[in-house]
Image: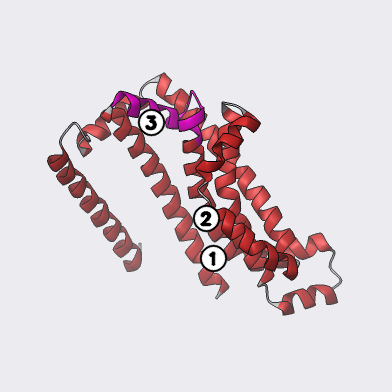
Amino acid sequence: MTMRAWSSTLNALVLVGLLLIAWQALFEVAGEHAMAPPIETFRYLGQLLATNAFWGHLIETGQAFLLALVLAVILGLAIGFVLGLHRFSSEVAEPILVALYSVPKITLYPIVLLAFGLGMPAKVAFGTIHGIVPVAIFTMSAVSNTKPVLLKTARVLKLKPWKVVTSVLFPAALPEIFTGLRVGFSLTLIGTLLGEMFGSQRGLGYLLMTAIGLQNIKVIMAVTLLVVLFAAAVSTLLIIIDHRLHRRAT
């Protein structure tokens, strides 16, 4: 490992250590009726992961999240490319997409329930709604800001439209598109969990909502810890890839 890699790893370990210390200190202040300490939470999470029932909920959430993320990426890319290829369309659509991005998606959940009912379709749809807009916005912006010389070269070479998209537009816009995917990942995960909390009888979100109703602090802390660890690990990996793509583009 290089010195830079060692430094980054050391900084990450220090940050994790400080977070654990802050967590323990907060537990000492709040007490066991408000939260669980770090060691007990990790131990209880290990016990949950050893049960088949918990894995059933975990797999349910994973399937819903994966489907929602795939739909958000595909639809977001399609919308972004279609609008980004026409400057007038992108100028008209951008403020609309930004407005949709700022709307609290929870207000749309009654409509989602009426359209899809309870269960897997509703939480997949709700997760997709959260993730599709940032992917579309970043893709549209990246495509519309592609250097004109690249498009002129494609026209001179008489490339077919699909070839222009795959060989010129997509590689040029990839760094910004990937940033949108990174944001879309986080929001899709949030949307999927919210969908499970309010309209499902299985999944991690359902477990959280049930534990909140029963004031089961151990389950709340353990499930939250698992979600945070997963989101932090994947987000860190995506950020590293994102930075490398941007460095190559400069």
User: Which is closer to the viewer, label 3 or label 2?
Assistant: 2
User: Which is closer to the viewer, label 1 or label 3?
Assistant: 3
Q: Earlier in the sequence, mark 2 or mark 1?
A: 2
For disc 3, the neighbor class at 10 Å (few under 14, some 14 to 19, many from 20) is many
Residue 205 part of the magenta segment: yes
Would you say residue 134 is visible in this rendering? no
Q: Which mark is residue 102?
A: 2
**As rendered, which of 250 and 212 lies closer to the eye?**
212
Q: Position of residue 183 (x, y in %)?
A: 51, 54
Q: Quick check: 173 above or below 39? A: below
Q: Kindly report the distance in space between the C-alpha atoms of the residues bearing marks 1 and 3.
A: 37 Å
The residue positioned 64% from the left and 43% from the top of the image is 71
For disc 1, the neighbor class at 10 Å (few under 14, some 14 to 19, many from 20) is some
Q: Earlier in the sequence, mark 1 or mark 3?
A: 3
Residue that protrudes farthest toward the bottom in the picture: 149
Residue 110 part of the magenta segment: no
Label 2 residue SS: helix
User: The disc labelled 1 sits on which kind of residue?
Assistant: Leu
Label 3 residue SS: helix
Q: Position of residue 54 (x, y in %)?
A: 41, 24
**As rendered, which of 67 and 11 lies closer to the eye?**
67
Give the extent of the magenta segment. 195-215
For disc 2, the neighbor class at 10 Å (few under 14, some 14 to 19, many from 20) is few
